[in-house]
Amino acid sequence: MDKKNPALTDENQVHEYDECSIQVWEINKDRLDSMNKNINTTPNLLSNWSGKSSCSIFRVPQSFVDVNGSAYRPHIVSIGPFHRGEPNLQMIQQHKWRFLRDLINRTKITLEQLLTTIHPHETKARESYSELIDLTSDEFIEMLVLDGCFIIEFFRKICKTIPVKHDDPLISMSWVNSFFLRDLIRIENQIPFFILQTLFDLTNTHESNRSLSSLALEFFNNSVNRPAEVLNKYENLVGKNLLDLLRKTYITPELDKPINRNINTPSHVIQCISKLRRAGISIKQGNGESFLEVKFKHGTLEMPKVTIDEFMSCFMVNCVAFEQCQRSCSNQFTTYTTLLDSLVNTYNDVEYLLDQNVIENYFGTDGEVAKLFNNLGKEVSIDINRCYLSTLFKQVDDYYKNNWHVTLETFRYTYFSSPWSAISAFAAVLLLIMSFLQTFYSMYSYIHPRR
């Protein structure tokens, strides 16, 4: 090796490598054909129309499932194609045919009429799902008719607009009803609302002048218990599906106003309850038709009362998923749950909300409610400057950062939050005054001794 000329040595090595090792790469024809096939294949797990506003029924991303478990999957009844045919849902599947038979016998509408009425809507219905549905045209239309007629007939029986047999197990067993309430608002367990409306109009024999929306909302009101005057406002409301219908009834006109885009909202949405209280910010029960109507006035967060139970937790989780997936959807539920996630860090924060009558807990322990609120805020995407609470977040942050508020209230919260801490603080101040007086008299006696 020529140590004096390493460059020459490297050049000789390159030439030697070139002469001995160069090979011509031959493209594998089978691999090339496979790649071309993939290039020309239409995605089926997230279809091309998933980003359109017409798409409204989604398979939830796995990241959401990892956080909230089976909140998106039906537990007793399958509606739509995503969970069709699952073994654990077959009990109610058999009763769907019974309900369809009851509907046909009562209305004298033939099965052929039902199928023929839905057939023109097949393409639009398929495009409502985020995945390509692997069903033939006949299978898909049969599913829409069977599931749609079952839901409509179930609502009619629950609301007593048609005769009901007292021993009908789906009506008389309370545990079935509670599962139905949750399963019919799961995002993966829906059929398009326009399919339901079409079937409802066809089978409406004028036993009642009630609308489909009013029947649906009366059914769900078995869990949320809102006044009749509130529900009456939405008797003609239309949603993309049942989940969206119920969700829209909580978005009052006050919450649907244009958003001020020029607000410089802090990156950290809001501090937790314990820190807010130290800064002099309190929380109390507010007034509002919807629990989403949160306000901030004179250092107080006003939050309308919300009952947290199995239904409401399921409803919130699925509303957030719907808002995250649906292109043209507003994000009020995502914003509200982000607020809850920020306010609550521990069970102590939940305990304060309970004491202030802001929440009513039928869900579990205070710690379980805290975990629920924290999970609601995980894996979600939200632009704080474009949400309906952006002004409120800015106002709370400005108030929190006001130094004299923080200093004064931190002292009050630390030393006067309970009678015992107040007594301790008073004793400490008294001891300090007595020590000062003792020191003063000692110095005075030294400077002016008695004669």
Image (spheres, rainbow, N blue to C red):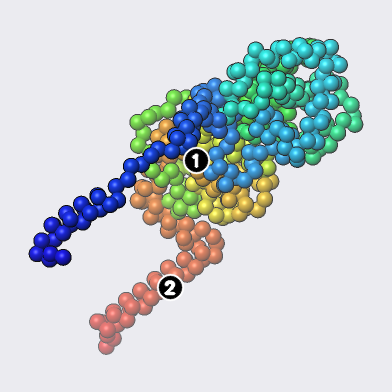
Q: Which residue is mark 1?
A: 380
State the image coordinates of residue 306 (x, y, percent, origin top left): 62, 39
User: Which residue matches tag 2?
Assistant: 431
Q: Is residue 182 visible?
A: no
Residue occupying image coordinates x 44% and y 24%: 258
Residue 161 x/y as whole percent:
81, 20
Q: Which residue occupies the foreground of this view, 223 or 441?
A: 223
Write the residue at 59% across / 18% down. 124
Graded by Cα atoms within 10 Å as few (under 14), some (14 to 19) or many (20 or more), the crowding at tag 1 reads: some
Query: Can you see residue 102?
Result: yes
Residue kind at label 1, given as amino acid type: Val
Q: CA distance from mark 2 to mark 1?
A: 54 Å
Left or right? Give the position of 403 relative to 193.
Answer: left
The circle on residue 39 is: none
Q: Is residue 159 above or below residue 78?
A: above
- Judging depth in this view, the residue of 319 and 140 nearest the camera is 140
Residue depth check, mark 2 versus mark 1: number of the one nearer the observer: 1
Percent across and percent down for residue 198 are 69, 15
What is the secondary structure assignment of the residue under circle 2?
helix
| Quarter assignment of residue 139 | top right
Q: Quadrant of the N terminus?
A: bottom left
Quadrant of res 93:
top right
Residue closer to the observer: 336 or 432: 336
**Where does the image place residue 119, in percent across and percent down from the top left?**
68, 14
